[in-house]
Amino acid sequence: MSASLTFEDYVDALYSAAERLQAELVDVPDDRAVPTCPAWSVRELVAHTGMVHRWATDIVRGSLDPRDTEAATEQYENDGMQVDDPGAWLLAGAGDLARALEDAPEDLERFFLRDAAPAKVAWARRQCHETTIHAVDALSARINGFPLAAMTDIDASVAADGVDELLRGFATRRHEELRTRTGSTVTAVLRATDTARAWTLRLSGEPAVCDEGITEQDPDASISGTAVQLYLGLWNRGDEVVQEGADVLGFWRDHMRVEWS
């Protein structure tokens, strides 16, 4: 699962997304619900995102004992819930994370997704998309609804890369529930209409398999949209993609979850 952007691209997109997240919430009450994450308030969204940034910084720097992760993340999240200026707190954490990534050695060794890019790039990639999606959540809170892709200011190349990380990195993990009950194989081709990117997803009774490109000429489903529309649709933040054939998208939304643990 190679990364399609440069390390510098990921770090720049990470911090730009943090700035968008902060800007979206300048005049939004802390207790407003986030439509795209209905269990969260605005303050909880900021606290979660800032916590993840600080946790990732500690992991990249090697300053956090894995046995202490739960206590550390709980403290960071509590800080985010109580700080007087949550926007400034968020940006401070994003800036520190960017510096930690930039200072990390090229041969950084830290746990990550199976078959991921080298750890330094993989951490930058993951935090780029973590922050970008939560910036969409902030936009959702501001407009009090689900945003259209055109409202998000996400670059198509970043979105296509995020689709790839989700399909080939997360969806194929052994513990995911993307398995057909009958064990039969269902195929779907996903196309980003404004880029040259496409993917073939195979669902069966075993862990999902996803190849880049179109490797199935007669799929059970065809799912298409711009890269940003696909990105939001697969992250359950939008509904602008077009689907033909079997309802693979509905199955995905019922069974695919990337959750903090």
Image: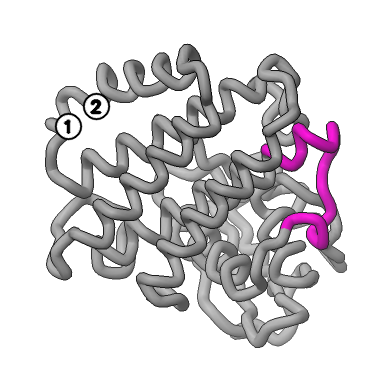
**Element on which disc 1 rests:** helix
* Magenta stretch, main secondary structure class: helix
Nearest the viewer among 111 and 184 is 111
Asked if residue 171 shows in the view, the reply is: no
Dot label at residue 166? none
Q: Is residue 47 left or right of residue 114?
A: right
Q: Mark 2 and mark 1: span between their CA atoms?
A: 5 Å
**250 within the magenta span:** no
Which residue has dot 2 on it?
69
Viewer-nearest residue: 102 or 185: 102
Q: Give the total of numbered labels.
A: 2
Q: Is residue 119 left or right of residue 208?
A: left
What residue is shown with label 1? 66
Kind of residue at badge 2: Thr
At 70% from the left and 86% from the top, the residue drawn is 217
User: x and y percent of residue 157 in the render?
Assistant: 60, 75
Q: Position of residue 230 (x, y in %)?
A: 72, 63
